[in-house]
Image (tube, helix red, strand yellow):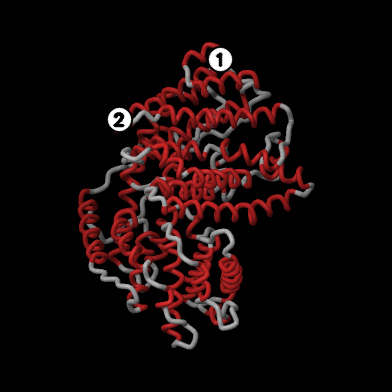
Amino acid sequence: MVQTNSSHVSIYKRTLWSPDFIQGLETNFSINYKEKVKELEKQVRQMLDNINYENGGELSSTLKVLELIDNLERLGLGYRFQTSITQILNKIAQQDDEDLISWRGVEEDEENILLAVVSLKFRLLRQHGYRCSAQGFCRRFKDSRGVLAGRLQKNTKALLSIYEASYLALDGETDLNEAKLFATENLLNKLHNNSGEYEVLMNEQVKHALDIPLYRMMARLEARWYIDAYSKREDANRLLLELATLNFNMVQSVHKIDLQELSKWWKEIGLTGKLSFIRDRLVECFFASVGIVFEPQYSCCRIGLTKVCSLINSIDDIYDIYGSLDELKVFTNAVKRWEVSEMECMPEYLQIGFLALYNTVNEMGYETLITHGKNIIPILSKAWGDLADAFLVEATWTHGNVIPSFEDYLDNAWVSVSGVLILTHGYFLMNQDFKKDTIESLEKCRDLYKWSSMLLRLYNDLAISSDEIEKEGDANAILCYMHQHGVCEEVAREYIKTSLVEEIWKKMMEARIACCEQDVDAPLTDIAISLARISYCIYQYGDGVKAPDEASAKDRILSIIMEPITIQGIGK
């Protein structure tokens, strides 16, 4: 084991998950359950195929279609029916909003249907990358004076729909910002006034939405929660519920198998045994990878991303807490040159770190070469070189006790947080079509990947506790903003959380729509949105990587990866 210098090392807590525990996870999924899933999927597919949606159809029919799609996606089933969903949404997107009659003056039941149709249509189309009008959407909720109608205050379902839709705003869509404030205020009021069984169920939905808006929720966390919430509804489609429950457990069994393979790799690579100062966070990295891409067919991508995230943590710890500045310059140069010969000038601990990185990335590149005939190693190694450069900039600041300007910090931080590196690997690990110009397609995603990475950085920095902001000696967004603008921590946090983060979500939404308009495959854009979502999840209650037991990360990992949903009434 490489000896560590206690004056340079921060002691991280031991991993919560032993190799024996991971290898002991139950991975079998009954053949009877698998057959049942096939049968149920066939029935749901028939439901979708039987939909004969036409422009200008009845409002109630339109609502049923939209709610079916929404339920499928929230229950974690969307990937199974993506082609059918896309075909239906394409038809709905062609519908002229003017075909939806003005709700002012119509009967209350019809008004409620119209409210649901307008809001759900806008949200589903926008979250799938369609460029639809927010102005037309918001106009439907205003009275003749252009003011959000007071009658909406009584309609919890409509308020929830408006609230969720408002989180898909683009820059300059002030109507949606107004709608968000209106809906949030009225939903908070309802939490204190509702009673009765129906109101209790609605309160659960309201609390859930106010905690994390749907578009910012990790997909698997939403599926786990929504399966339970949906089961309590009197109008629940039992066919969908049964399929969702079985599907959740079946996908989870695939995730467990992935994790067991990774646990063997992590033990074999031996970094935590040789470098005692690095974080042992394999399971937390796997949880993040599940957040980025959960679908069972992407095991290779999930496994690759977990390896990448584990190596990022290890190398980050080398730069942050162990290496001298001269040693880090040597290491950075080696990564940028991607040459084994550069190891000759390194101490043993850096040789170990470099060779683990070099071998793992080259192995990924080799698998892609023999499978698709495309050499991606120059692209991947370039991404690692950019990350090492950004790490070195931060190390130079730390060693020189420099607090950079807020702008200089962010210019470097969106790279150093490693989001672009992760998404670049994900792009190639998911991409099965190498007929297109690989570099050109990746370049189309540049802005999308940048803004997703910026959110990862800001959520990470917002998780830093007040005690740690200046004590650790590292630059962070809060500290840099405080020093540049001469404000207190509370003001800096508020600006980053309520202003900057919201602005970047809007930029990311615009970039996502632009990618869709340039025919970038949906999975390659979805991973960027999913990275932003898992960032929010991991850092919502603290640092879920450095201190997972103190940030609610353990409970979430158990519910998503370890613990299946109890199945009742289905033969094994």
Asked whether the residues under the numbered discs 2 and 1 touch, taking CB atoms below 8 Å apart as contact, a structural biologist would say no
Closer to the camera in the image, 550 or 472: 472
226 in relation to 102, above or below = above
| Total labels drawn | 2
**Residue 276: which quarter of the image?**
top right
**Residue identifier under label 2:** 373
| Callout in the foreground (2, 1) | 2
Task: Give me the disc on residue 202.
Answer: none
What amino acid type is highlighted by mark number 2? Gly
Looking at the image, the residue that sits furthest to the right is 486
Residue 1's x, y, as percent? 52, 18
Which secondary structure lies at badge 1? Answer: loop
Residue 198's x, y, as percent? 46, 75
Q: Earlier in the sequence, mark 2 or mark 1?
A: 1
Horizontal side of residue 290 vs 492, given as left or right: left
**Residue 5: which quarter of the image?**
top right
Residue 448's x, y, as percent? 49, 47
Which secondary structure lies at badge 2? Answer: loop
What residue is rendered at 57% in x and 59% in y?
171
Q: Residues within 10 Å of mark 1 (few under 14, many from 20)?
A: some
What amino acid type is highlighted by mark number 1? Met
State the CA–CA distance, disc 2 to disc 1.
Answer: 34 Å
Horizontal side of residue 494 vs 216, given as left or right: right
Looking at the image, the residue that sits furthest to the top is 344
* Residue 467 can be seen in this image: no
Residue 170's x, y, as percent? 54, 59
**Residue 460: which quarter of the image?**
top right
106 in relation to 268, above or below = below
* Residue 239 can be seen in this image: yes
What residue is rendered at 46% in x and 55% in y?
513
**Residue identifier under label 1:** 346
